[in-house]
Image (cartoon, rainbow, N blue to C red):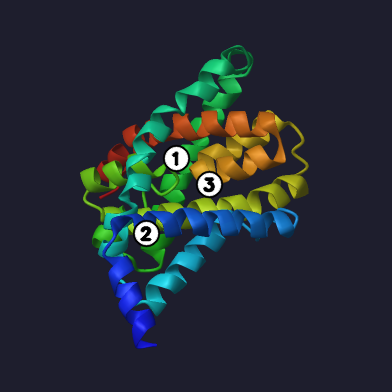
Amino acid sequence: MSDAVALWSYLARDPLLWLTLTLAAYVIADRTSEALGRHALANPVLISVILLAVILKVTATPYTDYFNGAKFVHFMLGPATVGLALPLYFNLSRVKESLLPMAAALLAGSLTAILSALGIAWALGVRGEALLSLAPKSATAPVALGVSEAIGGQPGLTAVLVILTGITGAIVATPMLNLLGVTDYRARGFAVGVAAHGIGTAQAFRVNETAGAFSGIGMGLNALLTALLAPLVVGLLF
């Protein structure tokens, strides 16, 4: 037992350990999701978060140590955000065909995400930085963190809320849209992208390629609009 502890202490000093464990956790989670037939509850991100949380808890590893080792994944959020322009570019002609409905849906979705989060939290007694951290929760992580800091929120708390929003959206979106009878994959994907950013977009691609492409468009446009609307809404309300 002492040898195992000594070995772990040695490995834990290597930053690559946490990057490797992060990638391994996602591979395991993705294989598990595949084995379960890509069930909505078997979301790879949710499973990998649980796996990593258990490892950090069992090994008593501070989150800062983990982040220092896995921050390459965080760094890649920047290029990934820039890459959101690609689905828009490749589907530009199809977007032009539905420009007005998409613009209306984008504005309604973005405002609903911001106002509903703030309103529900306010009614439940949440105040101060914690309340402001909720405003950009439906935007993709790099944008949400920047907006949270700009409006006086806690970026760390916003990061958690962004992940929870994405996982929840990825789980409930498909059953909900089926229940509502929405069959147009452009509308389905766009709604998921606006509401559940990257995690929802990954799930949309698993359902249908068109849905995934329009989810990426919704995700990118909502990130831009949230960056504009969240400070304005917070300024007007608070």
Give me the residue at 78% from left, 42% from top: 181
Q: Is residue 64 left or right of residue 45?
A: left
For the residue marked with disc 2, what is the amino acid? Trp
Residue identifier under label 3: 199
Q: Secondary structure at mark 1?
A: helix
Which amino acid lies under the numbered mark 1 shown in the image of this protein? Leu
| Label 2: how many Cα within 10 Å (few below 14, some 14–19, many 20+) | many
Q: Who comes first in sequence, dot 1 or dot 2? A: 2
Tag 3 secondary structure: helix
The answer to whether mark 2 and mark 3 are in CB contact below 8 A is: no
Residue 48 or residue 120, whichever sits in front: 48
Residue 22 place in picture, x, y as percent: 44, 56
Query: Above or below — where is 3 with respect to 15?
Result: below
Quarter that holds the N terminus: bottom left
Which comes before the other along the chain, label 1 or label 3?
1
From the viewer's perspective, is the residue at label 1 or at label 3 nearer? 3
Query: How busy is the neighbourhood of tag 1: few (under 14 within 10 Å), some, or many (20 plus)?
Result: some
Res 128 visible: yes
Q: Kindly identify which residue carries mark 1.
A: 111
Q: Earlier in the sequence, mark 2 or mark 3?
A: 2
Please state which of residues 177 and 17 is positioned toward the viewer in this rendering.
Answer: 17
What label sits on residue 18 in the rendered view?
2
Task: Note whether 129 is above or below 145 in the view shown.
Answer: below
Seen from this angle, which residue lies furthest front? 3
Residue in the image at 63% along x and 16% along y: 94
Q: How many marks?
A: 3
Name the residue nearer the viewer: 35 or 219.
35
Q: Quadrant of residue 228?
A: top left
